[in-house]
Amino acid sequence: MEITVRQAQRSDIPTLGRVLGLAFADDPIISWLLPDDASRARRAALMFATLARHDRIEHGGIDIAVDDSGEIVGAAMWEPPGYSSDRNNLRALPGLIRAFRSRLIAAGRMADTLAAEHPHDPPHWYLASIGTLPTTRGKGYGKALLSARLDRCDAEGLPAYLESSKPENVPYYERFGFEVTAELDATGGGPPVWEMWREPRS
């Protein structure tokens, strides 16, 4: 099986949003933010598509994994060194309101906590989200997505940072060189997240 990883285009946004929505349907943080099982994947898809459309697509920060038939089966959304999404918050707000509804304030508070804890120095790539379709897990798509951007980090001599919202994913990221730097309560008593940092490999 040959795995293709390429940069996402605007025409990919609806599909990559749906893929990430399904990928995160069992995520502890997304489940806390969107407690309704029946609508979670759909509303999460709207959130991811909104963030992609009004934030990360414009600076080439989204990689997608494509299967042999050309279908998108995974996506990784990154922010480059020094990037700030503040100027895009108002443009994204209508879509986020539709996604979170009564949970918008909780989502905003969580985002503020994560932003306050986010390291600023040295400059680094930030992996905001990565996921693959549940039916394709274990087939190497996640590894291909991570390796594509981490190879670039190594070539540029730049670190990488992420927050893992699933404890079982921590050892997976450690295999790629990430190390846990802190366990953070970003939800005020809900599920924790693990902050992880990776130094570039020479």
Image: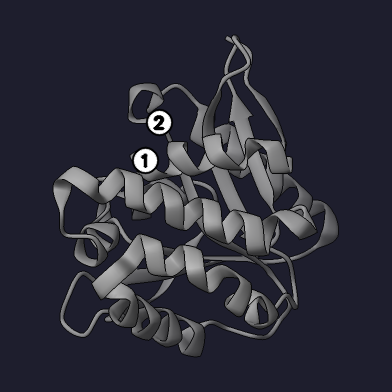
Q: What percent of the width, then of the height, locates residue 121?
A: 68, 85
In this view, 67 is above or below 5: above
Q: Residue furthest right?
A: 156
**Which residue is found at the position 44% from the left and 21% from the top?**
139
Quadrant including the N terminus: top right
Q: What percent of the width, then of the height, locates residue 155?
A: 83, 52
Say whether residue 121 is left or right of residue 142.
right
Task: Tell me whether the residue at label 1 lies in contact with that at label 2, contact meaning CB atoms closer than 8 angstroms.
Answer: yes
* Kind of residue at disc 1: Ala
Mark number displayed over residue 23: 1
Front residue of 125 and 178: 125
* Kind of residue at disc 2: Leu
Q: Residue furthest bottom?
A: 116
**Which residue is found at the position 54% from the left and 58% from the top?**
50
Say whether residue 137 is left or right of residue 103.
right
Front residue of 156 and 142: 142
| First in sequence: mark 1 vs mark 2 | 1
Q: Which residue is mark 2?
A: 133
Q: What percent of the width, then of the height, locates residue 36?
A: 15, 54
Say whether residue 184 is left or right of residue 143.
left
Which secondary structure lies at badge 1?
helix
